[in-house]
Amino acid sequence: MKGSIDSIETFGLVDGPGIRTVIFLDGCTLRCKYCHNPETWAMNEVNYDTDELVKKILRNKPYFKRNNGGVTFSGGEPLLQINFLLDICKKLKKEGIHIALDTAGVGIGKYKEILELIDLVILDIKHVTKEGYKDLTGRDIDESEKFIEELNKSGKPVWIRQVIVPGIMDNDEYLDGLVEYLKKIKNIEKIEFLPFHHLGFEKYQKLNIPNPLKDTPEMDVNKCDELYKKFMKKYEKSRK
């Protein structure tokens, strides 16, 4: 089985527990206005087969064992290369490797099958309303909802990630909506707010892609932390 991979990061520290090998797969049908990896949108030519990739991952197995690390599949949207992903994960499970999936939940099905092989889901929340989701990503929210339904059935632990874009998410109305939206997702262990930044802006220029947020300022880190604390108070209160 072969697939298309944009890049591989070794010794990743932010995409799941411990030291991790992070695999960025090509392909994404979303066009998030704040995306910092537009180079992963297109499905490029296949450049790895599963045996080759597993062999590369297993080189770091000693580091995984020392600190409860593993491998994280990200993108792009890894669920678009579902058969490739299934083949890799089956082989990694035989080796006892912890597997995390960083996803927006917008793939092409077989969610139940892949979730059986995944140890942790890092779920990227794009927006909490149908209208907001459509405006921000260019797609309907329905496919993400299908994935969340299967995710709940799987019982797998979930980490939530929410990018905070000034003028869109940095207000009480959105935070309240996020509290309500997360009620439908089971087994949440962790919630992260990621401040919007300009680090991917030069990629838009190189790829000659319009940048819809080119005039949007970066999210102030301190303000983002304050919003997170405010949100968590609301979230914890809603769970009592």
Image: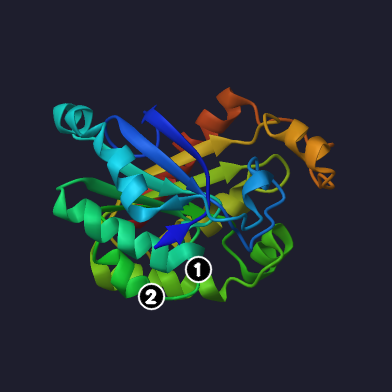
In this picture the colour scheme is: rainbow
Q: Residue at x 35, y 54 (%)?
A: 50
Residue carrying label 1 = 107
Please provide percent x and percent y for residue 24: 49, 45
Q: Residue at x 16, y 48 (%)?
A: 95
Residues at badges 2 and 1 in contact (C-beta under 8 Å)? Answer: yes
Relative depth, front residue between 171 and 90: 90
Q: Residue reaching furthest top? A: 222
Q: Dot 1, crowdedness within 10 Å: few (<14), some or many (≥20)? A: many
| Residue type highlighted by circle 1 | Gly
| Residue type highlighted by circle 2 | Lys
On screen, 104 above or below 20?
below
Q: Quadrant of residue 19?
A: top left
Picture disc at residue 110: 2
Residue 190 shows up from this direction: no
| Left or right: 131 as drawn, with respect to 224 | right
Q: Residue at x 48, y 72 (%)?
A: 145
Q: Quadrant of residue 118?
A: bottom left
On screen, 175 above or below 86?
above
On screen, 165 above or below 118?
above
